[in-house]
Amino acid sequence: MKQKTLDKINEKINLLDTASANFANKLIGTNEMKKVSAPLGIYEQRNSLFMMRIRVPGGELSLEKLKEIIQILKSNQIEKLHITTRQDLQLHDVLPGKLAKIAREFLNISMPFYGGGGDTLRNITACPHGLFYNNSVFDTVPYAALLNSYLMDYDRAFDLPRKFKINISCCPDDFSMAKFTDIGFIAKIANGRRGFEVYSGGGMGRESYAGIKISDFISDDELLLYSVAAINLFYKCGNRENRLKARLRFVLIEKGEDFFRNEFEKQLNDARNLSLKFQLDEIYKTITSGKEKYFARLFIPNGNLSLKILEKIVKNAELYAAESLRFSQNQDVFVIFSDSQKKEEFCNIFPEFSSHKISGLIKSCIGASTCKIGLLDTQKDSNAISNRIYEYLQEIKLDESKLNFIVDKILNNIKLSGCQNSCGLNRAVSFGFQGIKKNINGKVENFYIFQNQGSVSSGELSRNTGIEVKADDMPEFVLNIIKNLIDDLK
């Protein structure tokens, strides 16, 4: 990062220091605190403690960086961690008096919280499995990290009408949901050259919307150019008066595709005049190294980690010569190896995180027990669903190939969100559930709206079925879906 960016972040941390003290002394309230803390990815929880969101571009961290993180967490007595659906790492239950101190310590290891929240460029996501997946065109994680390093110094990216997201997928399956974000890129090779298909104007949340294709192919060195064009389009045309209509997708929805395409082209031409240089030398060096990679996938229940577990993972990853660690959008951990035998030995240490456990594999947002705007405790409900499915699978004793199919193709396509903001990504899967509150005979009760037929790869949003399921009935409702799909396997 450039010095001016560091100075800006330090200034925001100084403001946070003052605001935290005032908040702790009840001199300011939640809204005043949020104005200062949100751009740094810091939010108040329901228990009046705080969550801090660390940007992890592409979800990848070196073991050395992880050890630095662990030391900071230990010194500040932070025990509760969470992997997000945008591959961030969240710290939970942080005292207000420690916020600025922790933010400075992470900035000192080149991990600013800046852009973890607020009206800013959020963490750039990429497929964690690009090194191993059979359909992968190429690994996109290094592109996410490099793009992030350039855009952290781009002032407009941190002065937007609302949040802005960039997703990069490694293949047409579009695991990173490039078609459902502000600007998304899908890896592609044309005439022997690396590049991307480009989509823009999509997004999840209130009035979720699939983006439109902007280009069938751009070369990989144009990744920065197109990202800046989309940011500038949002900066210029985004709604700064009504936050409910302040995402880029509303420019597309309200002004139409022709306007959106024309404006994108204008911003693209302006960006070209900036002579942006996107240096890919380091990425190409890793491409030509030619080493085969292997991965251990740890299924982390609900994406929730303790410091103790993270330390155990990192310690053993180092012991067995792992290269790095990646967080996935499914809130799991991928540990990267160059030696298949060491990978197997590492996996044997963590049987509790095997897919065979099932518990916690139904994914959800963080839920109302922590989130201040959440309506339902989705993590409690998703665990209840997972446990019921596990009981059933124990009874019928499927062989391993069928069990793996259920995990990969079915369980990964069941997601819950505790409100209409869709943080659980329920609108882009085959079986999605959105939490609502209903007044039943004068009593407020918890329900889920069942949404189905969503597809990431085809860019199709799930549709409301009209079915509303009481939260307590969710385990049996989802199990019946599973049973029907298992019958189809026989």
Image (cartoon, rainbow, N blue to C red):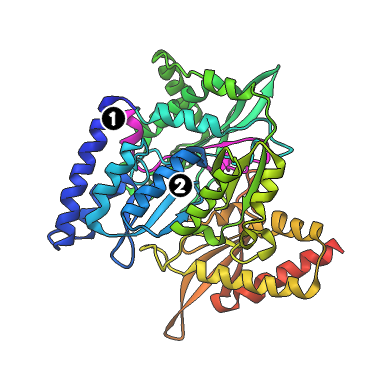
Alpha-carbon distance for marks 2 and 1? 21 Å
Q: Which residue is mark 1?
A: 5
Residue 214 image label: none
Q: Nearer the viewer, residue 397 or 261?
A: 397
Q: Residue at x 18, y 44 (%)?
A: 15
Quadrant that contains the C terminus: bottom right
- Residue receiving disc 2: 88
User: Is 67 on the left or on the right of 430, as rendered?
Assistant: left
Residue 93: image quadrant is bottom left
Residue 39 appears in view = no
Magenta residue check for 179: yes
Q: Residue furthest bottom?
A: 441
Placement of 100 over or under 142, stated as above or below: below
Nearer to me, 385 or 299: 299
Question: What amino acid does circle 1 point to?
Answer: Thr
Question: Callout 1: 10 Å neighbours few (<14), some, many (20+)?
Answer: some
Taking the spot 37% from the left edge, 31% from the top edge, the residue there is 152
Mark 2 or 1, nearer chain start? 1
